[in-house]
Amino acid sequence: MKLFFGTIISLIVFSSCGMQDDITKKDSPTSGTANLFFDEGLTLHIQNQIYTFKTTYQYADIALRTSNEKECIEALYNDSSKVIAISRPLTEKELSQFKAKNIYPQTSFAAGDAIAFVVSKSFADSTISLVELTDLLKGNDSTLFQGQHIKLVFDNANSGSTRQLKDSLIPNGTFGNNCSTVNNTPELIKAIASNSLAIGVCDYAWLSDKDDTTTKDFLKSVKILAVSKKNNETAYMPDQSNIATKAYPLCRTICIIRRSAEFSLGKGIETFIAGPTGQLMFLKQGLPPNRQEERLIEVDMTPLK
């Protein structure tokens, strides 16, 4: 009898293990495996989003791949990744290249974002204009402070921040000799903190969550410049409100792009980040979500006795 019950229990254990293994391997919106490539500038937000997703859906195995905008798009195209997170939608040219391979990417707009300019605490100014930035990008590095050579340092040569600044301010030009790059944002912050004649270019998503320990450490050694469109005009900080209203001149949009319309884990990731929980997380971490849930407030107009 003991042998009989022992056999039954063993069968149940092995059966349940097999079922769990099947669930884990099944590719669905809440299970399976996926590589998520994302622009390094979005690190803090993507890490928090996926941590919450995996805590909620324990059979989802998601490998995070820190990269840059260019490599993210290449990974999606080459099928190294089913879903990516970058700070813009695909261009018409990129979409046509995908369609040539019968691939029809699906995009969800997740949250507002911006390019941020950081300087050391001893930097002589607290604002900068797009006019001055354009001059600096072209290599006219003495126009900001007369006689002082100002360097521009980018978070990565192929980051979304680098690409957007070039496309928007010097579309037909080249970066000046005063422009250089590092490998990632932590390196950038370290380089800028010790140089009072340098301006760092990075993703505001690294700086939006003032309760995050990494952000707190960054802001102990650098400060963020306010930006105006023209000289002597009102300059705006890249904060949640100014990004939402587009008052800040260099805004962008975080996009979750998956490779196809398949009912897969990629779909689940996209839906989660663009859904109520993901949107609330962006809001609490200092970025304006793409949409906010309506709050219906009922007011009782009955006179008080």
Image (tube, rainbow, N blue to C red):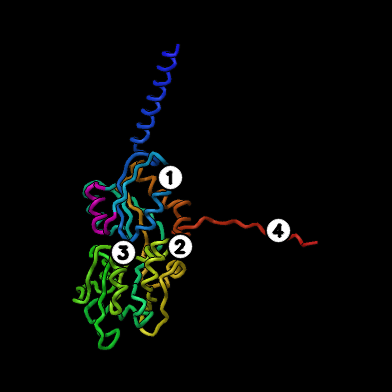
Which of discs 3 and 1 lies nearer the camera? The answer is 3
- The image's mark for residue 300 is 4
* C-alpha gap between disc 4 and disc 1: 40 Å
* C-alpha gap between disc 3 and disc 4: 52 Å
Q: Is residue 182 left or right of residue 257?
A: left
Residue span colored magenta:
66-80
Residue 128 occupies which quadrant of the picture?
bottom left
| Sequence-first disc among 4 and 2 | 2
- The image's mark for residue 186 is 3
Task: Identify which residue is drawn at 40% across, 63% down.
Answer: 112
Question: Which residue position is annotated with label 1?
Answer: 55
The answer to the question of whether label 3 and label 1 lie on touching residues, with beta carbons closer than 8 A, is: no
* C-alpha gap between disc 3 and disc 1: 27 Å
Question: In this view of the protein, which residue sits in the foreground, 261 or 34?
Answer: 34
Circle 2 residues within 10 Å: few <14, some 14–19, many ≥20: few
Q: Name the dominant secondary structure of the magenta segment.
A: helix
Task: Identify which residue is drawn at 40% across, 56% down.
Answer: 110
Q: Secondary structure at mark 3?
A: helix
Q: Is residue 247 above or below residue 36?
A: below
Circle 1 residues within 10 Å: few <14, some 14–19, many ≥20: few
Name the kind of residue labelled 2 in the image.
Asp
| Whole-percent x, y for residue 79 in the image | 24, 46
